[in-house]
Amino acid sequence: MIDEEFGLTNEEDELSLLETLDHVLDRGLVIAGEVTIAVADVDLIYLGLNLLLGSVETVNEVLGSRERRAALLDVRAREAGGGGGR
């Protein structure tokens, strides 16, 4: 079933560990989870996990494009808010 989902038909087409790691680093991977340890319905420990796995290049591309969009939105907001007062 998993082979069909990824389009793998025989053993020769299976992804190697290196190919999988390359794909993860190229695209990035986010893992989020949480664990609560409780005794007698009393929460004792809460552990939250947010993990981002990616190459430095990929992360810089994503963050750079977000910063450019935020700057563009900021400029548009300034123009819409006070553009006629000069």
Image: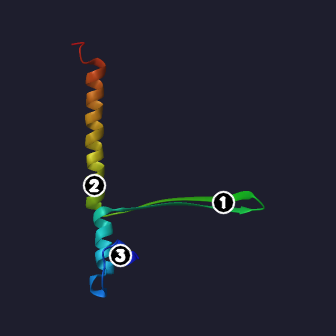
Q: Where is mark 3, residue-wise?
A: 4
Q: In what quadrant of the picture does the N terminus appear?
A: bottom left
Give me the C-alpha separation between circle 1 and circle 3: 41 Å
Give neighbour class at mark 3: few <14, some 14-19, many 20+ (Cα, 10 Å).
few
Q: Earlier in the sequence, mark 1 or mark 3?
A: 3
Write down the quadrant of residue 35 in the picture.
bottom right
* Relative depth, front residue between 55 and 33: 33
Q: Earlier in the sequence, mark 2 or mark 3?
A: 3
Write down the quadrant of residue 11 in the picture.
bottom left
**Dot 3 amino acid type:** Glu
**Dot 1 amino acid type:** Ile
Judge depth for marks 2 and 3 and give the one in front.
3
Give me the C-alpha separation between circle 2 and circle 1: 34 Å
Judge depth for marks 1 and 3 and give the one in front.
3
Give neighbour class at mark 1: few <14, some 14-19, many 20+ (Cα, 10 Å).
few
Q: Earlier in the sequence, mark 2 or mark 1?
A: 1
Q: Is residue 52 left or right of residue 58?
A: right
**Dot 2 amino acid type:** Asn
Q: Secondary structure at mark 1?
A: strand
Residue 21 percent coordinates (x, y): 32, 73
The disc placed on residue 60 is 2
Give me the C-alpha separation between circle 2 and circle 3: 34 Å
